Image (cartoon, helix red, strand yellow):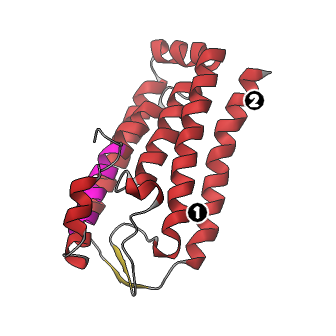
Amino acid sequence: MILNLCHLWIMGLWLVMLVYWAIAAFFTKRSVHHGFDKSGVLMRVGIAAAVIVSLMLARRSPELSALQESELRSVPMALAGAAVATAGAALAFTARAVIGRNWGTPGSRKADGELVTNGPYALVRHPIYGGVLLMMIGTAIGLITTWWIMVAAAGTFFLYSARREERLMTERFPDVYPAYRERTRMLVPFVL
């Protein structure tokens, strides 16, 4: 019973996040630039290909299948995964609410965008990325072992995207962003 509830909870977090993000996207400020980045597209395609190949290879591994089966039946793993995923969802949802109408897809620029430095943004510059990574880690711990591949792929993309966004933010807010960057971490408070 607890096992199934944890698994349903993790899946429910993802469903709620997808619905919330889709609805909230309609209420953002108008974008004036949707920065097309050829290297970013190539990186996304490369990561997607690596994930697909890795998942196909993992499906053929009897050892990985046995590990997945044992993890799916572990109540402590399910509880730990649900707790980590919940912490990640709380961080991502809070950050999304705080950034509000200033939110945009990576590389986009808002017509009258503001630099948000309160709430979770007072601790880290990219709390949405950090929250989603925690959700993915929780999913890998409590539900799907092969999600570690997704964690690695998403982590790579998030670091790339965060660095690109930081260059754009430095250009957009040259007087305040460098100081903000100095006093906060990128993804994990006090660490990274």
Report the label total. 2
Residue 74 in sight: no
Q: Which residues are magenta?
A: 155-167
Circle 2 residues within 10 Å: few <14, some 14–19, many ≥20: few
Tag 2 residue = 5
x then y, percent, for residue 40: 27, 61
Q: Nearer the viewer, residue 71 or 46?
A: 71
Q: Quadrant of residue 175?
A: bottom left
Horizontal side of 181 relative to 136 (left or right) equals: left
Q: Residue at x 42, y 52 (%)?
A: 127
Characterize the magenta stretch by its predominant secondary structure.
helix
Q: In what quadrant of the picture does the N terminus appear?
A: top right
| Helix, strand or loop for disc 2 | helix
Q: Residue at x 66, y 16 (%)?
A: 75
**Rounded to the nearest whole Å, what is the CA distance between mark 2 and mark 1?**
24 Å
Tag 1 residue = 21
Q: Residue at x 39, y 77 (%)?
A: 114
Identified by mark 1, the residue type is: Trp
Horizontal side of 174 relative to 131 (left or right) equals: left
Identified by mark 2, the residue type is: Leu
